Amino acid sequence: MKLNKKALFKILMITGCFLACFKSIVAASSASYLVASEAASSYDYEIALENYLNIIEKKTANEKIYQESLLYAVITNQLSLAKELAEALDSSQVVAPTAGLFLFADAIHLNKFDKAQRVLLKYRASFPNILTTLLTGWTSFLNGDTSSGKNNFSSLGDEKVISAIGSYHLA
């Protein structure tokens, strides 16, 4: 196989230009990630959040960065920011349980019980079954459907511990 020098030169030039253009963004994102990781391991969640937000701002963030940012926004009581991050995750193709749980809690807080049920339905597979069953039961009660709520709590099974949890919520 003969190597085409012109094609190879063209590929190297395009790659070089691409790397030169985005090198500073990638380097800055890497530094922000390193600072955020170190800050989080030292329980300095505000600094961790600030650096993760820098990565998001540069459009180099992935799902993990968004989820970590959401978690740290909640921990640092920046709930409006947490809502923005949860909605961004929710609108992406990713099903992130942290976003679903936050959006569920927000809907309950706003007395939007139908929306809370829709969120539960969307994230059902990513939550433990017992959590989904309990949240669905309580959401049904809040929405005025007591029989559906009771059925959810009763459906928790025959295992003693889980059945006891269902009975507790029925009381």
Image (tube, rainbow, N blue to C red):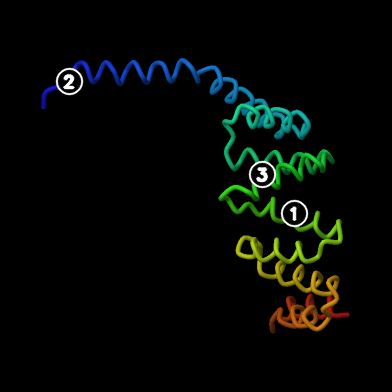
Q: Position of residue 99 (x, y in %)?
A: 69, 51
User: Does residue 118 sit above or below 27 in this rendering?
Assistant: below
Residue named by callout 1: 103
Looking at the rendered structure, the kind of residue marked 2 is Asn
Circle 3 Cα neighbour tier, 10 Å, few/some/many (<14 / 14–19 / ≥20): few
In the image, residue 108 lies at what x, y percent?
A: 83, 60
Write down the quadrant of residue 62 in the picture.
top right
**Residue at numbered disc 3:** 88
Q: Is residue 45 left or right of residue 142?
A: left
SS under mark 2? loop
Q: How many marks?
A: 3
> Left of 108 or right of it: where is 156?
left
Cα separation, mark 3 vs mark 1, equals 11 Å
Residue lying at the far right of the rendered structure: 171
Residue found farthest to the left:
1
**Mark 2 or 1, nearer chain start:** 2
Identify the residue shown where x is 69% and y is 84%. Answer: 158
